[in-house]
Image (spheres, grey):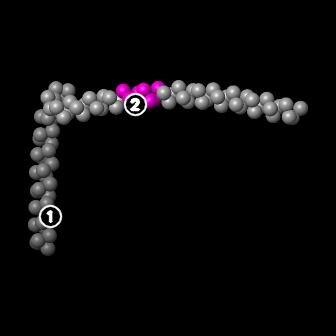
Amino acid sequence: MKKIIATFLLCTGVLATTSWAQTASGPAANAAPGGNSDEIVKMHQQVAAANRAYDRKVSAAKRVYNEQKAAAAKVRDEAIAAAHSGVDQ
């Protein structure tokens, strides 16, 4: 039983110090947003910006496609309604 308690306390201590170290370095790393001089970070930011621009263009194209599809469906529905009304009479 003492070994279990000792192991539990040891694990708790290790996890507590690890999380403390991460939170202590977090604000310092984020102190200057956008002012990072690391080349990899800049590259990832540029890739993310390119992906956002692509997503905006795809969304615009999808809106146009959906509008055209709705217009075609409306014309089709009108033609079907006209065909049905011609048969009913």
User: Residue drawn at (14%, 73%), measured in percent from left and top?
Assistant: 1
Write down the region rendered in magenta: 53-60
In the rendered structure, find residue 8 and report the number of the disc placed on it. 1
Of marks 2 and 1, which one's residue comes earlier in the chain?
Answer: 1
- Dividing the picture into quarters, in which one does residue 80 lie? top right
Foreground residue among 47 and 88: 47
- Which residue, as the protein is rendered here, is positioned at the far bottom? 1
- Dividing the picture into quarters, in which one does residue 54 lie? top left
The secondary structure that dominates the magenta segment is helix
> Which residue does the numbered mark 2 point to in the structure image?
55
- Which residue, as the protein is rendered here, is positioned at the far right? 89
In the rendered structure, find residue 70 and report the number of the disc placed on it. none
Q: Position of residue 61 (x, y in %)?
A: 48, 27
Q: Secondary structure at mark 1?
A: helix
- Dividing the picture into quarters, in which one does residue 8 lie? bottom left
Q: CA distance from mark 2 to mark 1?
A: 48 Å
Q: Position of residue 43 (x, y in %)?
A: 22, 32
User: Residue drawn at (61%, 29%), measured in percent from left and top?
Assistant: 70
Q: Is label 2 in contact with label 1 (beta carbons under 8 Å)? A: no
The crowd level at tag 1 (other Cα within 10 Å; few <14, some 14-19, many 20+) is few
